Image (cartoon, rainbow, N blue to C red):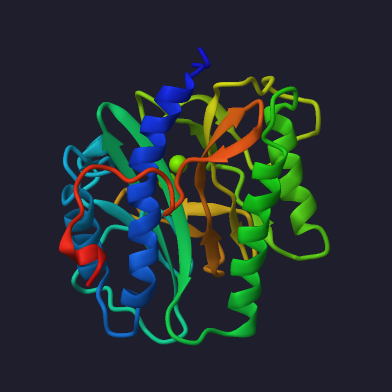
Amino acid sequence: MINLRTQGEMDTIAHAGSIIGRCHAELSARIVPGVSTQEIDTFVEEFIVGHEGAIPAFKGLYGFPGSACISLNEEVVHGIPSEDRILNEGDIVSVDIGVRLDGWYSDSARTFAVGSISSEARALLDVTSLALDAAMEVSVPGNHVGDIGAAVIRTCEGTNYGIIRELVGHGVGRELHEEPQVPNYGRDGHGPLLREGMVLAIEPMLSAGTPRIKTLEDGWTVITADRSLSAHFEHTVGITKDGPRILTLAEGPIAAGNPASETS
Ligand code: MG
Ligand code: MG
């Protein structure tokens, strides 16, 4: 069943999402060479719980040990934070964050550059971010879920990037993962109808090489099969009669609590 949400419910999801948006903004200055992915995770957790009632949604979900999924270079998603994973100049690192607030979830990911990165890595980040923009733009009532994937495909035309097909976006609401699935491939006019009130996590994942992936022995970390670089951008988006409403922006409604770390 695909749930439809009221504007007030979307407001609460946007409250949760604004914590993620501001956490990502704070991370920009903190993602530098020499930092471990555990340090990033600790910052994310403290930032989230510094807001009254907010909890890191990924921690313990299906048994995941971290507060954020932190995926380096060829890692696509679900990287486990570790003291032993140190960011180096030229790396790219994806930080996927979920927040639960007042019983509602929000979900957003962004891939960061560590110091100065190659023009190839920069191009991959730019195209993945543009794919998310294009996918959100068509997320309006009357379109279909297939239009979202088709927009991702169109954005990648003329590149040799792989579109990761085995991982998909999803509905978001009372659960982190709800119906429908939102693939990053599709055909215009196909798939479930987009209706006012739907809330979707739209999350293109691209690789600089093959679209094939595999999971490491830790049971979590998903990497590209050819170990090419991978990027991931995600927003939680509400379908409204006024167009797509991005619910994971830093400038969303301010959630309760205002920890000092936000202004330091
Ligand atoms: Mg996510
Ligand atoms: Mg997601």
Q: Residue at x 35, y 33 (%)?
A: 105
Choose between 53 and 130: the one closer to the eye: 53
Left or right of residue 73, residue 218 in this image: left
Q: Quadrant of residue 129?
A: bottom right
Residue 50, how many percent across, how many down? Answer: 16, 52
Q: Position of residue 69 (x, y in %)?
A: 33, 54
- Quadrant containing the C terminus is bottom left
Point 69% across, 20% down: residue: 193
Q: Is residue 192 above or below residue 29?
A: above
Q: In this rendering, would 88 be left or right of 41?
A: right
Q: Is residue 9 left or right of residue 204?
A: left
> Furthest-top residue in view?
1
Q: Is residue 123 above or below residue 256?
A: below
Q: Which of the 4 image quarters holds residue 149?
A: top right
Quadrant of res 55: top left
Q: Is residue 13 visible?
A: yes
Tell me if I can see residue 70 in this picture. no
In the drawing, does residue 228 fall left or right of residue 113? right
- From the top left corner, tell me how far across and down residue 244 is, in percent: 62, 37
Residue 151 position within the rendered picture, expressed as x and y whole percent measured from the top left: 75, 45
Image position of 28 with respect to 232: above or below? below
In the foreground, 3 or 205: 3
In the image, what residue occupies the spot 46% across and 50% down? 249
The number of callouts visible is: 0
Quadrant where ligand 2 appears: top left
